[in-house]
Image: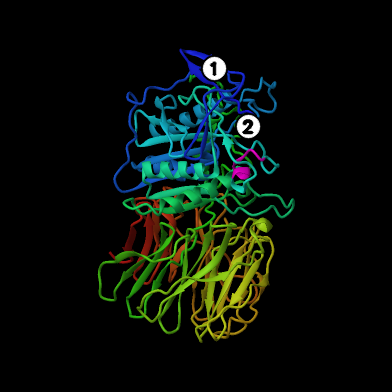
Amino acid sequence: MPRPALSTFRRGLLWAAPIAVLAGITGGTLTFTAGTSDASDVPSRGVPEADAVKPVRTSGEAVVQIMAHPDDDLFFMNPDTAQSIASGHSLTSVYLTAGESDGRNARRQDPAPRADKAAYSEARQNGIRAAYAEMATGNRTSPWDRTSMATAGGGRAELDTLRADPRISLVWLQLREAGSITGDRPHSLRGLWDGRVERLESQLAAGSPVRDGFAYTKDGTVETLTGVLARFKPTFVRMMDPTPGLNDRTGKLSDHQDHMYGARFAQAALARYAERPGRPAFAVQNYLGYSTGGLPHSLDPKSTAAKLRTLKTYAWWDHTDYCEDPAGCGDRKVAARPAGHGWAQSIRYARGNSASWVQRGASPGELYAFAVLDGRLAVWHKGAAAARWTGPVLRPGAGLDAGVTSVRLPDGRIAVFGTRTDLDGEYRREVVTSVQSEPGGRFGAWRSLGTPERDDETATSDISLPAVLVDRAGLMTVYVRDGGHSLRASAQRADGGWGPWRPAGGRDLRGDPVAATDAKGRGYVFAGTPRTVLAWAQAAPGGPVAGPVAGPVATGLPATTVALGASPDGADGVRLWFRKPASGDVRSARFAGSGHASPVRDAPGGVAGHGAVAAWEGRPVVRAGSGAVAASAGGPWATGRGLFAGAPAAAPAGFATLGLDGRLNWTPWER
């Protein structure tokens, strides 16, 4: 194991020992008292823990974001991050690595400075603190209290709390980063996860109040994150996509390896945290990383401008010494391209885009709603004559990924589908389903339909949320986008079993496929590409869907922002709902199975936003630019309050969202 570059602050001087001294192993952590250092002469800027302002966790909604690097939140989670800050609820951002890169804080066109990883890490921290302070108070110099806190893994982390708004806090675990997007770097989160190294060393920021270096084992890293979750008790967790897939052209990871494996460490910590009693229930949202830049822009100009403004603050765009720190006031590498590679113009959820999570029950007026809380299926129920919803009831079976979809069978039973991640042994995602025992009855145990992927190494287990069609006999066919960006199908047999995953065609498919059935019983499946939407349709209305469906066929539709919704439209067709790129405006087109779709129709009134569109009988429901839900019955858009997870869902009587506090929000169409 190479010696870690560590520094220790003593009596106001930067002191470095030539040899790292082993102090002991505690809780899966190897701790060093000192070590060789390449740090700049920057003293600790921390304050004693007793004197620091304490983080405030608001009642109800509390959000924790877990990222590999400083700026993953600004590039890939904003504007959701800014909306949480504006909501008045607590937000804690956790950074796994120091983001030290090569230690050179400069644009490519600038003269190369001396490599100083500790100083560059400090500069990135300064940029994040400035960006968050500006989003929260309007002033990038609004002060933070920086202190050192013990971690459950046996090391220490830096905790920063915004003095003017203690709801906002930052946690810096300061582990070593990979230093390469896809290159072989054993001393990285990837190497730690895969067991190539026993421990991953720290890289402390120059001004951090954490002065003694450490190293975590794999279990120690998971336990450290679990402890952070236990401290801040989130009701909603944001993280990157742990299964981003491979680049079709290069065959390499489509995202940074730190993003992917940082998300897997977060998954493992959430699974462990979910076993702890006495904590609030939590939901999870995953975000697409680098590959979102190759897709049509999903944000409107106003949202893009606000996101870019925050990125420029982080990037120390004006290069003035406003922070008075010799390490620097931000990330000058980002200053060379503050919009990234098209990342500032978009935000995309990697999972949880389904708008089919509210379903009619067997009795007229009866409704069910489904979500994933604590990695388990949460079920709400509204009786035919009941004015209120009951629930949630958490069903047995852990490991569910964010987002589920549901279908109603001809006899009135409901089937729920999702994906599940197995963290025990080899990492694996699979499609699962749970079906009611009888109309209005209990939901049965989860049944695995397997996965179209050979193994995790082939395409990082990158499968979509299932789309499902049902024939008149009640047999179902499940459609999934695989890691090769094509469609796969598994059909239910008459004996209730499921057939193998077979190719259904299509190329360059992105996001989740969606399914809908018209009034005659003919089923359709749609999937987006970066340029258009492809469609599959049953050969005959009401016919079996167990056999091949026709497709893919070209719809003739223009590019969308990839997230799709579909609903019945007349006897012999369905209406596809989507967003206009670089606008967020809601659009739709009718498709009847042959020929191109109808001309695109823009929803009147205009409403910016991102994500999937839900609809019932021509009434769309969306995420507005503010992050709140908005609905239209053909006229002006009515916008609600409060942030929500995933996509909205629409039903005959109203529409639903899942709040970031884990509560079901229901709004009747007529009020």
* Callout 2 secondary element: loop
How far from the left and from the top, in percent, is residue 84? 40, 43
Counting residues from the start of the chain, the first of labels 2 and 1 encountered is 2
Amino acid type, residue under disc 2 in the picture: Ser
Amino acid type, residue under disc 1 in the picture: Pro
Label 2 sits on residue? 101
Between residue 385 and residue 30, name the one nearer to us.
30
Residue 178, relative to residue 291: is it above or below?
A: above
Number of residues whose C-alpha sits closer than 10 Å to that of mark 1, classed few (under 14), some (14–19) or many (20 or more): some
Between residue 236 and residue 87, name the one nearer to us.
236
Within the magenta stretch, is there residue 35?
no
Residue 74, relative to residue 317: is it above or below?
A: below
Please name the residue shown 40% across and 61% down the image. 632
* Callout 1 secondary element: loop
How far from the left and from the top, in percent, is residue 564? 54, 62
Label 1 sits on residue? 326
First to last magenta residue range: 186-192
Between residue 23 and residue 87, name the one nearer to us.
23
Looking at the picture, the colour scheme in use is rainbow
Residue 668, relative to residue 571: is it above or below?
A: above
Please name the residue shown 59% across and 24% down the image. 20
Residue 330 visible? The answer is no
Please name the residue shown 51% across and 62% down the image. 420
Number of residues whose C-alpha sits closer than 10 Å to that of mark 2, classed few (under 14), some (14–19) or many (20 or more): some
